[in-house]
Image (cartoon, rainbow, N blue to C red):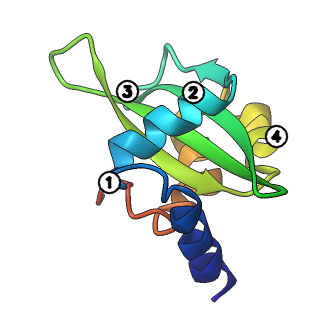
Amino acid sequence: MKKIVLSILLMLCFKGLKTQTCEEMMDFVKSESYGSTFYSYDSDAISKVTFYSVYMDYKTYYFAIVCFKRKYAYQCSEYIYQVASNTKMYYSMNYMESAGKAFWEYIQPYNKNLGCAPDF
């Protein structure tokens, strides 16, 4: 229930945007904060994960933008997740061993918060 309320609050914070698409949320988050990026050169699925913290309405919100590799392409597909404040720390301590496992353990559980994550 707390996650749903937080997601609704976050969407209200984005009310200044004309529409609230996932891409626009990513653009807003990227424009409001510098990110910390963790590259995964050896991963079959994840190219990089960038963590952001955005301060809005006297609160800090935490995001992860995950770039999934595309088959037969140099580009990757980006998806935004609203995560907990400690997600970056846990991911950073574990991604070198397995970026995929760290993703499933620490980022994927937040896939419903914004409704911007892919369905696996």
Q: In this view, does 47 lie to the left or right of 38?
A: left
Cα distance in 3D space between marks 4 and 3: 22 Å
Question: Can the viewer see residue 94 in this picture?
Answer: yes
Which residue does the numbered mark 4 point to in the structure image?
Answer: 89
Label 3 or label 2, whichever comes before in sequence order: 2
Which residue does the numbered mark 3 point to in the structure image?
Answer: 44
Which residue does the numbered mark 1 point to in the structure image?
Answer: 19
Of marks 4 and 3, the one in the foreground = 4
Local secondary structure at mark 2 = helix
Cα distance in 3D space between marks 4 and 1: 32 Å
Percent position (x, y) of residue 52?
68, 36
Give the residue type that dot 4 points to: Met
- Proximity of marks 4 and 1: CB atoms separated by less than 8 Å: no
Residue located at (49% from left, 17% from top): 42
Label 1 or label 3, whichever comes before in sequence order: 1
Q: In this view, does 44 lie to the left or right of 70?
A: right
| Residue found farthest to the bottom | 1
Give the residue type that dot 3 points to: Asp
Q: In this view, does 63 lie to the left or right of 73?
A: right
Percent position (x, y) of residue 15?
48, 59
Residue 21 vs 109, above or below: the answer is above
Give the residue type that dot 1 points to: Thr
Looking at the picture, tell me which residue is in the foreground, 59 or 64. Answer: 59
Cα distance in 3D space between marks 3 and 2: 29 Å
Cα distance in 3D space between marks 2 and 1: 17 Å
Residue located at (38% from left, 54% from top): 117
Residue 2 vs 104, above or below: the answer is below
Of marks 3 and 2, the one in the foreground = 2
Q: Badge 2: few (under 14), some or many (20 or more) residues near its Cα, within 10 Å?
A: few
